[in-house]
Image (spheres, rainbow, N blue to C red):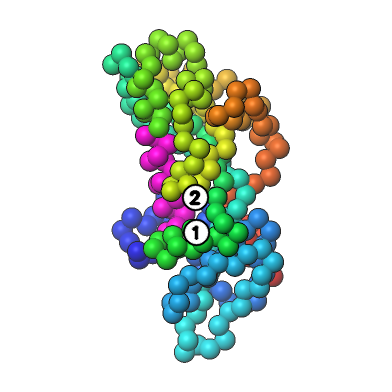
Amino acid sequence: MSDHSPESDDDAPRLFSGERRSLDRLARVRPGTVVIMFDGRRPPRVRLPGEMLIPSWWPFMGGIEVLPVTTDTVEAEITVDDVMTADGQQIHRLELLVLLRLLDDERYTGLQHLAEHYGGELGLFLARGVQTELEMAVRTALRMNDFADIRRQSLLKVLREAWLPYNVVDDLVEVQGLSIHRVEWSAETDSAGETAAESAAERHWVDPYIDDSYVEDSDLGGTMASSSEDDQRSGVGG
């Protein structure tokens, strides 16, 4: 897939990956990151933490481009609109925050194969895959419950008991936790009154598969790979 397809959008959400850019100096892969290398002559190669990235010194051979990918836990927002319940009522909008982590073998073979097809759009593909699969799971779960029961039990309890997928995107992404960010129960609802009670600083993450298992938001060390030119955040170090 071309990196310059019409679907490419600088503002579109991406997961795990930073910006694909030219490698113009010696660099070392930072901890918590892998780097995918593209030279235009061979399939993409994955470089692991601590390995050196060596640019091409021969202009006639073409340049080398790199795509940093974080292996830490990242946070993503999943938005689901106009969800039907079992009794035919509708939840106007549901916004979830989910914790995600890449699953792969020690050489990141699955990631390498995806990079062959999607190139610099890898992060966009992963974001769309996560959104599609989790949205489908949420719609299925709420379609099995009446509106009044959902309000009484709480959305989080309903979703936690609804067999949400452990892994998504062909088992390459693990779902580690979820939190309700905001709910608009109807199109006429004042969304300000429906925001989750916890503030961002006080929010707790709920393991979707184990009751009463919580992880403090502040305990999470992982961050999403940035598309910034700042090397500290890109995963490529000198």
- Position of residue 174 relative to residue 137, above or below, is below
Residue 85: tell me if it is visible.
yes
Numbered disc 2: secondary structure: loop
Identify the residue shown where x is 63% and y is 64%: 48
Res. 74 mark: none
Disc 1: which residue = 111
Which residue is more in the foreground, 133 or 221? Answer: 133
130 falls in the magenta region: yes
**Circle 2 sits on which residue?**
172
Question: Is residue 1 shown left or right of residue 112?
Answer: left
Q: Position of residue 214 (x, y in %)?
A: 65, 28
Q: Locate residue 145 relative to residue 88 in the image: left or right.
A: right
Q: Is residue 128 above or below residue 28?
A: above
Amino acid beneath label 1: Leu
Say which residue appears at 33% left-offset and 26% top-offset.
Answer: 82
Identify residue type, mark 2: Leu
